Amino acid sequence: MPSPPSAWQRIKLGRKNILAVWEAEAFAYEFVSTQFFTRRAFLCNSPDAVQFAFGSHNESFERKSPAQRFSLLPLLGDGLFISDGDVWRRRRRIVNPIIHVSRLPEFAPVMVESIIEVRDRWATLPAPGDIDALGEMARLTAEILSRTIFGRQLGHEHASVLVESFSEYQRHIGQIDLLSLLGFPDWMPRWYSARIRRSVRRIHALLDDIIEGLRVQNDRDDKSIVGRLLNARDRDTGAPLDAKALRNEIAVLFMAGHETTANTLAWTWYLLSQSPEAEARLHREVDGVLGGRPPTLADVPKLIYTRAVFEEAMRLYPPVPILSREALKEETFQNVRIPKGSIVIVAPWLLHRHKKLWRKPDHFMPERFLPESDEPVSKFAYIPFSIGPRICAGMAFGLTEAILCIATLAREFKLGLKPGHVVEAECRITLRPGSSLPMQVSRREPAVSGDGKPVPGQSLSCPFHHA
C-alpha cells in the first residue's frame, strides 16, 4: 500500500485542488491525525467525531481555521462566516430573525418571479438551446438575493459584475495558509494578489453603492433584508450595525446564498442529465403537483422527490466540501489528545461518500432521502449546511429556493450535457463543476394520463454512478 502524502505533497496538491489532498483510503477513515509542520491536524470523519467537534464540544472549536479565515478575510471582514466569540454571537442574534424560516412567505414569491423570468428566456432559445448552466444558476441566485436583500432588481450588468468578481476571487485566492502551518502568528499580514484585491474592490463598491442608496432612502417600512438590518439594534447595547459591519454581513449572505446554491443547482442539472430514470421520476412529480401553473410555497412540502434530488446532489457535491476549525483549548477524543492550536477538519466531501455510512456511496440515488429511507444513518453523517451552533442560518432559504427552481424549470425543460464536455469537480472555497457547465436546453411537454390529468410520480430506483 502506498504511503500517505507528506505535508509538502499535500500542500502542493491542495494549491491546485484542495480535494486532491485526500487519498482514496480517506473515504473510510473515522478519526485520524497528521502533522503539518508545527500544526497537528485531526480529521473527524464519523458521526461521533462530527458530533464531538461541531456539537457537544463546539465551544472548544468555534473558531474557523486560519486557512478559512484568511482565505475569506479580504471579502467578508468580520462577517458571520468567519467571525467567532462575542462578535459572532451578537451578529447571529441580529441576522437570524431577518432570514428566519418564518420569512419564507415573503421571500418565496420573489424567488418564483425571478425563476419565471429565466423560464421565459429559455423558452425563446432555439431547440436545443446552448447555455452555461453554472452561469445561468449563478445569475439567477444573484438576482433572487438582490430582490430579497435589497428589495430591488440587480439587473444584468450588476449581476454580471458580482458573479464574475466572486468567480475571480475564488480562482485566485489561496486555500492553504502556509504561514500558520509554519507557526507564524495571526497578526502577521497575509499577502493577496492584485487580482484578488481588484475583485474585492468591485464587490465592495457595488454593495456599498446599493446599501448607501437604501440608507439615504431611510424607509422604516422597508421589508428588504438590508432595510431590516439598517433598522436592527444590538439587544445589549442598542447600537445599529455600522456601515462596514453591514456590508460584511451582506457579503456573507451573497457568498453563502448565491455561490453555494448556484453550484449545487448546476450539479443537480448535470446529475439529472446522466440519470434518465431519476429525471423521469422528477418530471412526473412536478407534473402531478403543479399541473400547468408555477409553484408556490405551499407546494414545497409536496415536492418530496424534488427535494430528495437536491439533497442527493448536495451529498455527492457538498457546497463547502471542507470545514476546518482551530482548537481554542486542549481536548480529548477517544483517548486521543487534541492540543490547543490544532486544526480539526470535518470534510463533507469524505463524510458524504463514506464507505461505511452509505449504500453505494458514489451512486446518484435520490430515493435515499425519501421519508421511508433509512439513510442517512445519523444527522451528523449528512451536513451540507454544517451542523451545530454554526449551522447555516440561510438553510431554509436555500432549500426552498432550490426546490422552487428545480420544479419550475424541470416542468418546462430537459437539460442535457453538451456532447464532448467532461465535468470535473473543482474546489476553490466552494465546489464547482469547473469554470462553466455547457448544457443544451430542450422543451418538454408535461406527461398526462388518458383523462388529461398529469401523471403522478412512481417509485423508481436510479443506479447511476459518478466516478
Image (cartoon, helix red, strand yellow):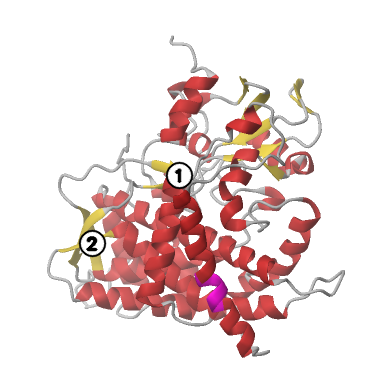
Residue at horizontal 57 percent and vertical 52 percent from the top: 385
Q: Tell me the chief SS of the magenta region.
A: helix
Q: Give the range drawn in magenta.
A: 206-210
The label on residue 131 is: 2
Density class for disc 1 (Cα within 10 Å; few <14, some 14-19, many ≥20) is many
Q: Looking at numbered disc 2 in the image, what kind of residue is underneath it?
A: Ile
**In the structure shown, which secondary structural element does the residue marked by tag 2 occupy?**
strand
Per the image, the residue denoted by label 1 is 428
Residue at horizontal 41 percent and vertical 47 percent from the top: 171
- Would you say residue 209 sits in the magenta stretch? yes
Q: Which quadrant does the C terminus fall into?
A: top left
> In this rendering, would 139 be left or right of 331?
left
Q: Residue furthest right?
A: 236
> In this rendering, would 455 be left or right of 127?
right
Q: Which quadrant does the N terminus fall into?
A: top left
CA gap, disc 1 to disc 2? 23 Å
Near-viewer residue (13 or 392): 13
Q: Looking at the picture, how far across and down is residue 291, in whole percent?
A: 31, 77
> In this rendering, would 366 be left or right of 329?
left
Near-viewer residue (248 or 348): 248
Residue 424, picture quadrant: top left
Tags 1 and 2 touching, CB below 8 Å: no
Count numbered badges in the picture. Answer: 2
> In this rendering, would 48 be left or right of 434?
right
**In the structure shown, which secondary structural element does the residue marked by tag 1 occupy?**
strand
Q: Looking at the picture, how far across and down is residue 99, in whole percent?
A: 62, 70
Residue 403 shows in this picture: no
Q: Could you tell which of marks 1 and 2 lies nearer the N-terminus?
A: 2
Residue at horizontal 33 percent and vertical 57 percent from the top: 134
Q: Looking at the picture, how far across and down is residue 148, in whole percent?
A: 53, 76
Near-viewer residue (437 or 217): 217
Q: Looking at numbered disc 1 in the image, what kind of residue is underneath it?
A: Arg
